[in-house]
Amino acid sequence: MMRGLCAGLGLMTMLHPACGAAVVAGPSVAEKRIIDRQISRIADPATRRAVQAQDVAWQMTTFLCQNAARGVLVRMGSQPHRFFLQDAGPGSQVVASAALVSGRGQFLRAGGGIEWVGFAWACHLDPATGHVAHFDVSPTGPVQAGP
């Protein structure tokens, strides 16, 4: 009944969940502004186009969440520039809403030897400002070496 009422009123175009329409997750206006500003600073046109072609999850993760992740991961034992907020599996970065991006990643443990540690992460954003409110990490264990 609700779907029929919403459709009859022309409200399906508003993407309201009560009407059964899918809600498309993506960046807020403020978040999009930050992403676009960062991309515009890329000097090489070919690199800039390649970055623009990346999906929204990658762009939000890279330009909104990565710096906040660094401090948290270093406190957990990561080298400052040796971490990835993704893995080789599908769905390793997911945009739930303009307020939440989550995924799986790995970091290289600081110190001797090569030990990669897997983790799950959640980047909580303030859509009004585009800034990270909180970055959560939960270790998942050692990452097995690839083939």
Image: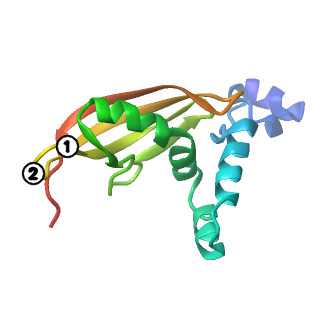
Query: What's the distance in space between the residues labelled 2 and 1, CA to CA?
Result: 8 Å
Q: Residues within 10 Å of mark 1 (few under 14, many from 20)?
A: many
Please state, as top left, top right, bottom left or bottom right, where the C terminus lies in the image.
bottom left
**Quadrant hosting residue 122:** top left
User: The disc labelled 1 sits on which kind of residue?
Assistant: Arg
- Establish if 97 lies above or below 49: above
Q: Viewer-proximal residue, 15 or 64? A: 64
Name the residue furthest left.
113
The x and y percentages for residue 2 are: 75, 24
Name the residue furthest bottom.
46
Q: Which residue is mark 1?
A: 109
User: The disc labelled 2 sits on which kind of residue?
Assistant: Gly
Left or right: 58 as drawn, with respect to 21: left
What mark, if any, has residue 113 been given in the picture? 2
The reply to whether residue 135 is visible in this rendering is yes
Left or right: 75 as drawn, with respect to 142: right
Q: Secondary structure at mark 1?
A: strand
Residue shown at 26%/31% (left/top)? 76
The x and y percentages for residue 81 are: 35, 49
Q: Say how the picture is coloured.
A: rainbow
Residue shown at 56%/41% (left/top)? 64
Name the residue furthest right.
9
Does the residue at mark 2 contact the one at mark 1 (Cβ under 8 Å)?
yes
Left or right: 85 as drawn, with respect to 39: left
Residue shown at 26%/40% (left/top)? 78
The x and y percentages for residue 77 are: 23, 35
- Establish if 11 lies above or below 84: above
Q: Viewer-proximal residue, 61 or 7? A: 61
Q: Secondary structure at mark 2?
A: loop
The reply to whether residue 1 is visible in this rendering is no
Left or right: 68 as drawn, with respect to 27: left
